[in-house]
Image (cartoon, helix red, strand yellow):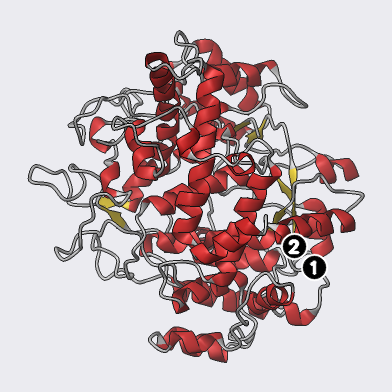
Amino acid sequence: MTILFQSHSGREKEKGAGPSAALAAPPTGTDIAVDEQADFGYFVPPLDAPENYLPLSAATVGELDTLGDLMIEAAAAPNTEDSGPDSTMPPVLTYWGQFLDHELTARTDRESEITSVKEPHPPAVSSTVESKFRNARSPRFDLDSIYGGSPIGPGITADTVTVISGLRHPTLVNKMRIGTAVDPGPLPDGLDEHRDLPRYVQVQAAVRDAALRAAQASLPPPEFAKFSAGLPQRALIGDTRNDENLVVAQFHLSFLRFHNKSIDFLASHNTGWIPDFSSAQALTRLHYQWLIVEGYVKGVCDPAVVDRVVQDRASHFFKFRAEFDARRPGSRLGNALPLEFSVAGYRFGHSMVRAFYDYNKNFGRSSGGAFLDKAPLNLLFGFTGGGGNIDGPKKLPKNWVMDWTRFVGVAPHDSADGLPARVARKIDTALAPPLGEMVKEGNDETDGQLKALFKSLARRNLRRGYNLRLPTGQALHKHLKQTGAVESDPITDLSAIFNSKPQLRDFVKNSQSKFFERTPLWFYILAEAEKGGGNKLGEVGSFLVASTFVGVLLADPDSALSRGFDPTQSPLRMGDSSPIDSIAKWMRFASVME
């Protein structure tokens, strides 16, 4: 993907007729200027054996909706901290995971003929899903959301090249463009104010005009009108999904700053590296890719499973790709990702989302003078390019710049005062109340029932898994055990996990669809983690995430994992000459954290 104008939800624009349009047409709607498409396929060979899947009936869809409703916690009272149990994981892992998801996949949340949650029954057969459902992202950790991808390739227009060029600083040509936060303040720390994403309000007219022409070519008139009206405050970044909530937006900013600080470091130290764009880009990617395994994957997965996958060189992932290629010889695009990962396993992060965050001294714990004592999730969506709260100069207010010390685990604080803990929620089967009434979703629906459906993340995830014909959790677990990918046995009666949640236990046990033994895969992954305490994924979830991430890295011969890179080999160093070997050091090197 080169430049992506896309939100998480929405509908696909009508495609042209003919098999080529269905098999290999570039993404449409709000997706523009791609340089690669890729496949999705099944880890469990799609035999369509009934025992491997949820029962095919409208009644099953109704029970999935009921299960989704049971997963959303009820708010004790407005503006009170959610009651979900705290994990030991720092909150950065929640949104780091979202950034990584945007690196690998796009379109898994969009409404189309294959993926409709509005009309999920009857689902397409597995072979149809594999032949028609495409990934609109290049499945590599190459930071194309930061750098814009290659400006050369099929479908690349002059307007695309202009927008990509606009990502770079207009005069300091080796650096990336960043934005400046504006009053009202104060800033949360003693660092500089250059901590907003670059926005179209600050760029040359030629870049804005190119973006408008590119968007107009692919958007229906009503969507284009909305895009055009909001263009000044929109972030000029490779994937606009990274400006849909403020934590991901500030995480994205750290990459732009890391790149620019790399230029400064190489210019002021005799390392042998030339302080130019290519050097900074290469070092940013290598540090990022090393942190993916050592910081993120080992932070959310069982480290023993991760080590096993690395030592095995992700053999099961490459076997999956080879089997997919063999059964799709006439329609494959290549570089397939497992549907079980993209549509179920990797959605575990939704359970880690908090309703409120201790965000900074202005919107969190403070010695006095704070605006609010916590930051509601809805405001973190509001202070973005499409959120409606960036007004006036169309830039981020200084008082909403993030204090990363409260998110990366370096300044822990308990929640005895009733304010949000500086940890993520546990990985389990309960979702925070705002995810049952998502502020930015479903607002264009006039039918009340459809609006409620699109606003419920749990119902959407469960319907999507049914709609895309995912195997049950037990079927996947059995397959992984038989092939030697995991060592544990499937959970034969999932309801036994929920003795402390009698309503959920009784529903799962007594459901007509027999969810206790034929469990929706996403719910199974969450329940497996809950059974183990909720501070890591269980073995199946850990395998899905670790196998996919390690496999994607090893498939790239230039990745940190393929090269055997570690931070001690880098010319970049912290002020005390130590290597940049943690997410906290990443943030400090980028000067977005004190």
- The percent coordinates of residue 297 (x first, y second) are 51, 55
- Quarter of the view holding residue 435: bottom left
Name the amino acid type tagged 2: Tyr
Residue 120 is at least partly visible in this image: no
Name the amino acid type tagged 1: Pro
Left/right placement of residue 413 relative to residue 83 reads left
Residue at 68% x, 29% y is 33
Left/right placement of residue 21 relative to residue 408 reads right
Residue at 81% x, 73% y is 48
* Residue nearest the viewer, comparing 460 with 555: 555
Residue at 74% x, 72% y is 483
Judged from the image, the secondary structure of the residue bearing numbered disc 2 is loop
- Quarter of the view holding residue 171: top left
* Residue nearest the viewer, comparing 182 with 574: 574
Please identify the quadrant where the C terminus is shown.
top left
Please identify the quadrant where the N terminus is shown.
top right
Q: Is residue 311 above or below residue 165?
A: below
The residue to which callout 1 is attached is: 45
Residue at 52% x, 50% y is 293
Say the numbered circle drawn on residue 353. none
- The percent coordinates of residue 64 (x first, y second) are 58, 75
Dot 2 alpha-carbon crowd within 10 angstroms: few under 14, some 14 to 19, many 20 or more: many
Dot 1 alpha-carbon crowd within 10 angstroms: few under 14, some 14 to 19, many 20 or more: some
Residue 195 is at least partly visible in this image: yes
Q: Is residue 5 above or below residue 491?
A: above
Judged from the image, the secondary structure of the residue bearing numbered disc 1 is loop
- The percent coordinates of residue 221 (x first, y second) are 62, 32
- Quarter of the view holding residue 73: bottom left
- The percent coordinates of residue 572 (x first, y second) are 42, 28
* Residue nearest the viewer, comparing 142 with 121: 142
Left/right placement of residue 252 relative to residue 362 reads right
Say the numbered circle drawn on residue 42. 2
